């Protein structure tokens, strides 16, 4: 019987969230980042306490110390079983602290970024193993799942819409956040969707626009379809899993709409060139 090589074992190894969190905790609390001018060895956590806590952009409720802040965001208990949601929250917190440290002219070690390589390598390894990436938003960096279709679409839209499309992938299983983001996206695209629907020539863009409106109007997005004049029996009895399916279906239709719109523009340009 052929044995598994070292590389087979590494390739087949599945990262567990509790293990990933424990590694992050080690590099956050214990790994020595800097030996300061007085000979004291400083961890990342200690550097945050000394140089970043007072000016952290997420410190918005008068928290008295770092532990108090971490309690508010759900990171007060760093031991025990963890989910990947916990891991990604911890990464976002660490990156917020890191960016705050590096943005301060007064931070004496801001040019020693190589000293943080173990922590950053750990974060990058976890993101790679979970098929995720860090995305910069106006408020800070967030972790989202990689999605090639979404990536292509986001390149074609302005920054504000792109951030909404990114954020939708971030809120996995959070129905309220998904619904709000979808409503914001629909509001942004509303004029273009209505123009496509009114187009007398039926094409794929016209069909996709109709599908977007159909899902948005009948599956608890624009309206509460469980009560009142907009109620329908199917939407009234959706489980959370089924509701998320329809939210995701709407998101995919929106991505397709943007791609089709871009294709139509390219086709029109090509036709104009041919007519010259």
Image (tube, rainbow, N blue to C red):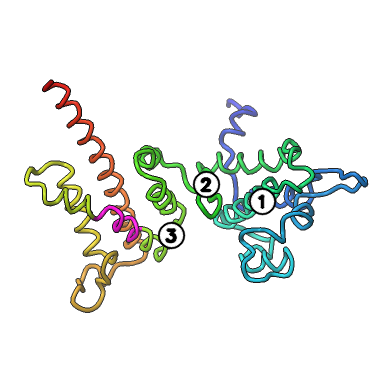
**Disc 2 designates what residue?**
136
Mark 2 vs mark 3, foreground winner is 2
Mark 2 near mark 3, Cβ–Cβ under 8 Å? Answer: no
Residue 152 vs residue 157, the one in the foreground: 157
Q: Name which residue lies at 68% across and 59% down.
A: 55
Look at the image and tell me in which quarter the N terminus lies: top right
Give the SS element for disc 3. loop
Q: Name which residue lies at 39% across and 50% down.
A: 165
**Disc 1 designates what residue?**
100
The residue range painted magenta reads 182-190
Alpha carbon of mark 1 to alpha carbon of mark 3: how far?
30 Å
Alpha carbon of mark 2 to alpha carbon of mark 3: how far?
22 Å
Q: Categorize mark 3 by other alpha carbons within 10 Å: few (<14), some (14-19), many (20+).
A: few
Q: Name which residue lies at 62% across and 27% down.
A: 5
Give the SS element for disc 1. helix
Q: Categorize mark 1 by other alpha carbons within 10 Å: few (<14), some (14-19), many (20+).
A: some
Q: Quadrant of residue 180?
A: bottom left
**Disc 3 designates what residue?**
173
What number of labels is visible?
Answer: 3
Q: Name which residue lies at 64% across and 64% down.
A: 59
Left of 177 or right of it: where is 110?
A: right
């Amino acid at each position: 019987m052929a044995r598994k090589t070292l590389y087979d074992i590494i390739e087949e190894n599945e990262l567990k969230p509790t293990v990933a969190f424990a590694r992050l905790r080690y590099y956050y609390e214990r790994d020595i980042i800097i030996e300061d001018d007085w000979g004291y060895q400083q961890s990342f956590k200690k550097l945050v306490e000394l140089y970043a806590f007072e000016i952290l952009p997420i410190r918005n409720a008068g928290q008295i110390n770092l532990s108090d802040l971490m309690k508010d965001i759900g990171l007060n208990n760093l031991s025990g079983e963890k989910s990947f949601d916990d891991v990604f929250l911890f990464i976002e917190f660490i990156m917020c602290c890191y960016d705050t440290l590096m943005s301060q002219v007064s931070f004496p070690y801001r040019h020693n970024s190589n000293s943080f390589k173990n922590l950053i390598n750990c974060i990058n390894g976890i993101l790679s193993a979970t098929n995720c990436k860090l995305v910069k938003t106006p408020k800070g960096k967030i972790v989202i799942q990689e999605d090639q279709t979404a990536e292509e679409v986001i390149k074609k839209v302005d920054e504000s819409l792109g951030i909404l499309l990114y954020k939708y992938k971030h809120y996995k299983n959070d129905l309220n956040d998904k619904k709000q983001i979808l409503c914001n996206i629909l509001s942004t695209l509303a004029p273009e969707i209505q123009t496509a629907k009114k187009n007398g020539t039926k094409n794929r863009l016209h069909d996709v626009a109709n599908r977007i409106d159909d899902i948005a109007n009948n599956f608890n997005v624009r309206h509460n379809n469980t009560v009142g004049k907009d109620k329908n029996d199917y939407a009234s009895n959706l489980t959370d899993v089924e509701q998320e399916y329809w939210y995701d279906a709407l998101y995919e239709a929106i991505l397709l709409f943007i791609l089709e719109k871009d294709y139509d523009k390219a086709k029109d340009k090509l036709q104009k060139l041919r007519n010259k």
